[in-house]
């Protein structure tokens, strides 16, 4: 029977992952969607001669 410590060596023992997981990817997708939405909002407001200030 092997000991527990021999199975838990490596990255899993420290709690660090090898790289970005799916949630980090989804964060970048949502950020891109927000930036795109803001850009389209500015273009739509420009069609109505909207000016800041």
Image (cartoon, rainbow, N blue to C red):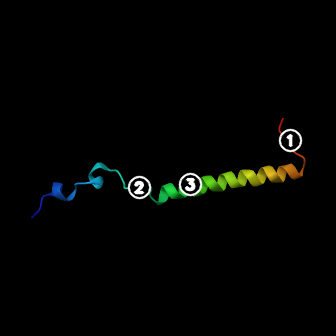
Q: Residue furthest bottom?
A: 1
C-beta proximity under 8 Å, tags 3 and 1: no
- Residue at 69 percent across and 55 percent down: it is 36
Q: Residue at x 41, y 55 (%)?
A: 19
Q: Earlier in the sequence, mark 2 or mark 3?
A: 2
Residue where numbered disc 1 is placed = 51
Separation of residues labelled 1 and 2 (CA atoms): 43 Å
Residue 24 in percent (x, y) is at: 49, 55
Structural distance between the alpha carbons of marks 3 and 1: 30 Å
The image quarter in which residue 5 lies: bottom left
Q: Quadrant of the C terminus?
A: top right
N-terminal of the two: label 1 or label 2? 2
Element under disc 1: loop
The picture quadrant where one finds residue 50 is top right
User: Can you give x and y, in whole percent of width and height, for residue 15 in the image?
Assistant: 32, 50
Could you tell me residue 45's position as x and y percent?
A: 84, 50
Quickly name the residue at label 3. Answer: 28
Callout 2: SS: loop
Q: Nearer the viewer, mark 1 or mark 2?
A: 2
Q: Quadrant of the N terminus?
A: bottom left
Examine the rendered structure and indicate whether residue 51 appears above or below residue 37. above
The secondary structure type at the circle numbered 3 is helix
Quadrant position of residue 30: bottom right
| Residue 10, x across and y down, in percent | 26, 54
Mark 3 or mark 1, which has the lower sequence index? Answer: 3
Residue most extreme to the left: 1
Label 1: few (<14), some or many (≥20) within 10 Å?
Answer: few
Q: Residue at x 56, y 54 (%)?
A: 28
Whole-Å distance between the Cαs marked 2 and 3?
14 Å
Q: Identify the disc placed on residue 19.
A: 2
Lateral position of residue 23 relative to residue 18, left or right = right
47 with respect to 35 (left or right): right
């Amino acid at each position: 029977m092997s000991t527990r410590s021999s199975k838990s060596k490596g990255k899993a023992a420290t709690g660090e992952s090898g790289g970005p997981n799916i949630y980090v990817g989804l964060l970048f997708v949502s950020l891109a969607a927000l930036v795109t939405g803001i850009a389209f909002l500015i273009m739509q407001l420009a069609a109505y001669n909207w000016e800041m200030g």
